[in-house]
Amino acid sequence: MKKDSIFKRIFRFYWEGFQNMTLGKTLWLIIFVKLFIMFAILKVFFFPDYLKKFGKQPEKQEYVSGELIRRAINP
Amino acid sequence: MIDNISSSLIDWSRAQFALTAIYHWLFVPLTLGLGFIQAIMESIYVKTGNEFWKKTAQFWMKLFGINFAIGIATGLILEFEFGTNWSNYSWFVGDIFGAPLAIEGILAFFMEATFIAIMFFGWQKVSKGFHLTATWLTIAGATISAFWILVANAWMQYPAGMHFNPDTVRNEMESFWAVALSPVALNKFFHAVFSGWIIGGMFVVGVASWFLLKKRETKFALESIKIASIFGLIACGLSVWTGDGSAYQVAQKQPMKLAAMEGLYEGGKGVGLVGVGLLNPNKEKYNDGQDPFLFKIELPKMLSFLAERDLDGYVPGITNLIEGGYQTRDGGVALSATEKIARGHAAVQALTNYREALKAKSDAVIAKDNAIKAADDEALQQANDAFQQANDTLQQAQTALDKDFQYFGYGYLKDPSDLIPPVGLTFYAFRIMIILGGFLLALFAVTTFFSFKNKFENKAWLQWICLISIFLSVIAGQTGWIVAEVGRQPWAIQDILPASAAISNLSASSVQLTFFIFLVLFTILLIAELKIMCNAIKKGPQIVEQ
């Protein structure tokens, strides 16, 4: 009998594995809900990249150097 | 500390990061420890062919899976916080942090993700040997993953192998191996992993004890206890060894942290180690003359021995570190905090000069182009002079920056006392870690003894202690991190960037809001984990015992 290709066997391995899960289904649900909260809510609304608003590298360098200098206390 | 960033913002940023890191560290050690134990059990199954060990390994693997699923990606939140709340820091260290974290993400994470699927789905589909290999590689992936994260953390405690580039305002890696294999990183890695093994061992002994208390799954419980007890005992021994190595590194690289860990204000030669002590709450300043302790019991000369490998070695206290003037290991004279602050200001001033000269150079280039276009010789000469002057200033500023960069962070401190971390929290957290570590070592010795003498089953008192000790082992791990992180304050990066300069200029209320969002989210997830875990434990391994 002809053997299935390696890709087909890998796919079937995962497919059957996921199909036969019991507790795993609950855990995957928790993982997806968690990832959704993290990436679709927290990252988007609460954790933007702070330096993104400064555009390209030179502007970011300028901003950070300005902040580092400004926050230092002059003797 | 500084006028334009509120202390409230600094504190909330710290609290937010601490909350996330503490929550993340609930899962990581159990993954590392429990994973190793289940792999040992599966190895026994493969060697003996006994189905009992397969069922035993599968049960612990199920609990490993629950812990892994709830804990997965919680570390990513720390990376969100780097980008949002610690943006100056992220920029400043980007290249150094980037490499270990990229390796962690690509190599270790994919290794874990690939082999964990074989571990859970492959029992009936791949050979025993292949499955066992996948199990060990999953644990290896998790451990390698931890290694790179701890390398990044260790660099913050002991910045090595980099050079600060004032053009990019970033630290750039000069030696990957100096970063990855620094003595602080290696000690930190092994100490953290072995503490994870202790937690894994205690978890197995504790859960198995619950089965014995319930008079269920007796053979499974007793055999699990034997393996986990020996594993935990070995892990405790290794933890003592690497803990000593870590403390030695702290003494060499972060003496202020060591002084805080010991509540040591006035150092000297032949200093004792405080075994038990009660700090004096009335001591408010390092130089107020108040005795730092209400009482203490010391092990004579032991701190000198542990810190310097010499019973009469000199260990500086908080006051000595601030006032300087004592002889350093290399024969020099220690700088006072005031001198370091002055050199920090000089470094920041050098950066200021450099950035201004950089702008002046850029302006001179434009002026030169304009002068050439206008064929204005006088303007060209002026532009050339300005260009040359800017170049000279750049060189001078670079030299000054290189000379004082090791004290760069001191330029942000207003008062020498800003250098003192919270002594009470560091001191007590260290004592709790040590006392619990000693207790767990003794407990594993007792459980090993009784389990191999076949006298564990009827010791209900011991089973109760083991069950409760699951939480004690977690507390030991967490207090260890509190010592490591609180004890290095005010620094985000030791000596070169304090937290006050590292944080983003956000409103304190926005950080406060996300702190409470995390608190709610983490609490819900923790309740979910505990509920699912408890249900899985109650169900048991379902081994038909003879």
Image (cartoon, rainbow, N blue to C red):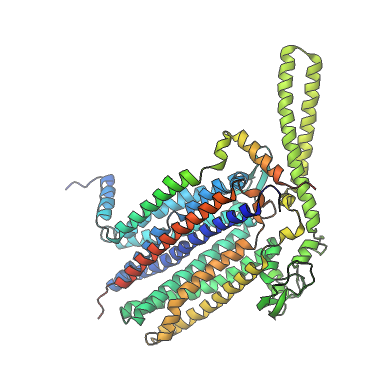
Say left or right for B89 vs B353.
left
Can I make out residue B359 in this image?
Answer: yes
Which of the 4 quarters of the picture holds residue B426? Answer: bottom right
Q: Nearer the viewer, residue A4 or B495?
A: B495
Vertical comparison of B543 with B385: above or below: below
Q: As rendered, which of B502 and B542 lies closer to the eye? A: B502
Residue lying at 57% horizontally and 55% vertically, measured from the top left = B151
In-image side of B522 versus B363 (left or right): left
In the rendered image, the quadrant that contains the C terminus of chain B is bottom left
Percent across and percent down for residue B167 are 67, 37
Where, by quadrant of the figure, is residue B36 drawn? bottom left
Q: Is residue B329 above or below residue A50?
A: below
Question: Which quadrant, please, contains the N terminus of chain B?
Answer: bottom right
Q: At x 46% / y 53%, what residue is drawn?
A: B108
> Is B159 displayed left or right of A23 in the figure?
right
Q: Residue furthest left?
A: A1
Task: Please say if B377 is above or below A2.
Answer: above
Q: Is residue B227 visible?
A: no
In the depicted structure, whether residue B255 falls above or below residue B5: below
Q: Quadrant of residue B523?
A: bottom left
Q: Position of residue B148 (x, y in %)?
A: 53, 54
Q: Position of residue B458 (x, y in %)?
A: 37, 87
Q: Residue furthest front?
A: B509
User: Residue A13: x percent and y percent?
Assistant: 27, 52
**In the shown orientation, is residue B193 left or right of residue B388?**
left
